[in-house]
Amino acid sequence: MNERKAFTLGLGAVLLWSTVATAFKLTLAEFTPIQMLTCASLVSAIALFVVCIMQKKTHAIISTFSANPLYYLMLGLINPLAYYLILFKAYDLLPASQAQPINYSWAITLTLMAAVFLGQKIRPQDWVACFLGYLGVIVIATQGDIFGLTFASPLGVGLALLSTLLWAGYWILNAKNQADPVIAVLLGFLVAIPFAITLSVWEGASWQISGKGWLAVTYVGLFEMGITFVLWLGALKATQNTARISNLIFISPFISLVLLWQILGEEIHTSTLLGLLLIVAGLGIQQLKQRR
């Protein structure tokens, strides 16, 4: 029964994550990246606070922050503030069918950063995974012209890669954090929201947003930055086979490309599919190594 529950929760999380690239593009049609970050963070904070109420954890929010305020301030500035602001800007500059697979290479970036900052050994399999992953990024970013190295948006590609560094760095900082993960993520949003609001005011962009736009940003806040994280944690907690649940994530980028094609009409280049296959192959090699 627990394994069925774990599979259902995990699959639900993966299917929701598969929709967010499309939701990002729909939201960015009306919001600036800073506006999107501000509104989605507010929605996420409210959703996670409701989860804390349901799980009877609200009493631990203040004590968790008070135990190490500078640590949580740093985490919040990295994620969600810097990470999502840079990621949203990358999506603003690139087709989602390019930005999403490049961002998906963050797990490969994590391997390299863990070696530098945590002293973890990089084995031959990891080097193969890194080579395949970043070759895939180059194939996607150049639309197959890997020798010409011509990028449609060099800044967009650079920001997408920078987002992988920030996301990997966030999880490295979290490696030894013993706090409740839902509370830790909620604290990140609570730290980031005042900064995001300040940036929105400073930007001075128009807030004449349609109802469709508000629905889109609410969806992003709930299902990219909030509730889906809780579903994924629940799946990992319920299962006895973490590898099987973790492997579900491999279907997400392919479903995402189909949705981008069907809903937004984005052209999915052959180079994008090839690059994504290279990235997924690299991640798969890492998974095989971990099982052994």
Image (cartoon, helix red, strand yellow):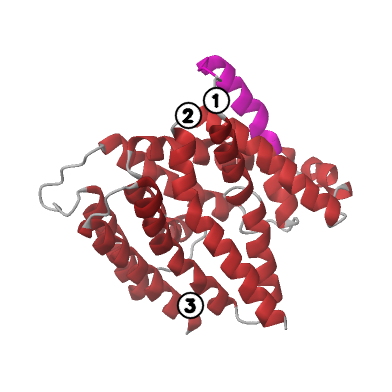
226 with respect to 206 (left or right): right
Q: What distance separates the C-alpha of mark 1 from that of mark 2? A: 6 Å
Q: In the depicted view, which residue is nearer to us: 111 or 182?
A: 182
Q: Which residues are magenta?
A: 190-206
73 with respect to 101 (left or right): right
Q: Which disc number belongs to residue 209?
A: 1
Residue 239 appears in the rendering: no
Magenta portion: prevailing SS class: helix
Q: Which disc number belongs to residue 30?
A: 2
206 with respect to 197 (left or right): left
Q: Which disc number belongs to residue 290?
A: 3
Position in image of residue 122 (x %, y %): 40, 68
187 shown above or below 125: above
- Indicate the amino acid at tag 2: Glu
Q: Quadrant of the N terminus?
A: bottom right
Q: Which residue corresponds to the image point at 32% horizontal and 40% vertical from the top-left? A: 94
Position in image of residue 113 (x %, y %): 44, 55
Contact, CB < 8 Å: mark 1 with mark 2?
A: yes
Q: What distance separates the C-alpha of mark 3 from that of mark 2? A: 43 Å
